[in-house]
Image (tube, rainbow, N blue to C red):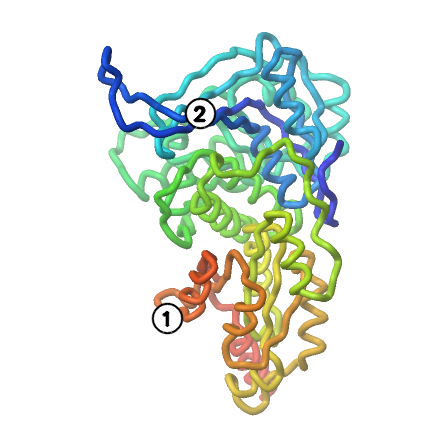
Amino acid sequence: MSGRGTGRTPLVVVGDALLDRDIAGTADRLAPDAPVPVVDECAERVRPGGAALAAWLAARDGREVTLVTGVGDDPASRTLRELLDPWLTVVPLPLTGDLPEKTRVLARDRPVVRLDRGDGRAREATRQARSALRSAKAVLVSDYGRGTADALRDALAAHPPLVWDPHPRGGPPVPGTRLVTPAEKEARAFAPADGEPAAGLRAAARDAAALVRDWRAAAVAVTLGARGALLSYGEHPLLVPAPAAHPGDSCGAGDRFAAGAAGLLADGALVGEAVEGAVGAASAFVAAGGAGALPPAGAEPAPAAPDTDDPHALAAQIRARHGTVVAAGGCFDLLHAGHVGLLQAARGLGDCLVVCVNSDTSVRRRKGDGRPVNPLADRVRVLRALACVDAVAVFDEDTPERLLADLRPDVWVKGGDYAGADLPEAALLQEWNGQAVLLPYLDGHSSTGLLARAAEGAR
């Protein structure tokens, strides 16, 4: 059964699936026979892991997803198929051995120990897998070093993927990959040693530049955890900071980053925009509790966000399905690249995006006579035409607090140009446990600046 289709570009994920288990409980004492904690009142949860997690997260974004991976007939493989079947299509590769399982034992949400078993590897490519790659519009490789990417390397080389998420035990990405996403330690291990000591951002920048050259990739984004990501095209790297640092469980954040970046690139975003959106999505993912806090995977996916002009009805339906409602606001007088990048990144943070737009009188009070240049009806029509926007809501006040109190979004997004400023909406969202976040904003893009340049050119 395929995943949900909402007009977004379908995605093929190629990589090594795992089965992840969390056994969670409390630990208030040590065992009498050894200095180890006793974990009581345990509850077990299973979820997709590895490439299967990346594919499932992409499907939860509302995208049609096909996963090409090694699976067998062992108990772990059967459990994984049951979890994935409601969400996406699995193209199986023959597996030698049992599907790998990773079990975490947690006490008060903190890992105590991890248990690994299963040594299965993808044995060979199949005609069905090659056919899926030939017809794919967008490909994400999630390589966990267990043979899937290697088995299909020739097919991947013929049609380089958008994103390759590497693993130290796997092979290098194929030349021509648009974006490679190693973690900081992985980049250090992959990069050739040059004998010069370096640490921190300097080391990450040096490693990323070296990997762009060695891998012949268009770009490399080194993920830096709570610090965000460093994007390099070979020189002069761009640091994309995380909207906020969260102390939560980071398990699965790399898969969230890769799936988010691949989805944005598939839908036409620039690499920089995709990395910004992926950083925001990964940050929100950790803030929400990481992979351990995800809803049960085996449940039937909710239908796609309803096509409705009523933003309140849309928010209510998404909330009833335990989805995440995201809202973003602004005048959007002259829609430009900065707006589009922000809204695409915001949509990646949840299950629907409601754009809160100032009415004409509200814009006039804020911007002065002569604004808005485009009347409300035109601004709303342009916003609704964006694939990342699910609904538009209008407010007459100077600020959207009253509208937000009615919509009660889970996430409220502001552009990074508000950094350091007071955000009155942040306190409001705390009333229903919502979160206000900042996303990076493209420098040099503003409606006011566009109007000034147009006026200068007309002289």
Residue 189 visible, this angle: yes
Q: Is residue 451 left or right of residue 199?
A: right
Residue 174 visible, this angle: no
Residue 111 - label: none
Residue 51's place in the image compared with 249, above or below, is above
At a point 52% along the width and 89% down the height, the residue shown is 368
- Please state the horizontal and vertical placement of residue 258, each as a whole percent of the image: 54, 39
Residues packed near mark 2 inside 10 Å, few (<14), some (14 to 19) or many (20 plus) = many
Residue occupied by mark 2: 23
Residues packed near mark 1 inside 10 Å, few (<14), some (14 to 19) or many (20 plus) = few
Which is nearer the eye, 96 or 189? Answer: 96
Among the 4 quarters of the image, the one containing residue 333: bottom right
Of the numbered discs 2 and 1, the one sitting upstream in the chain is 2
Q: Amino acid at mark 2?
A: Ile
Residue 422 - label: 1
- Please state the horizontal and vertical placement of residue 107, each as a whole percent of the image: 35, 29
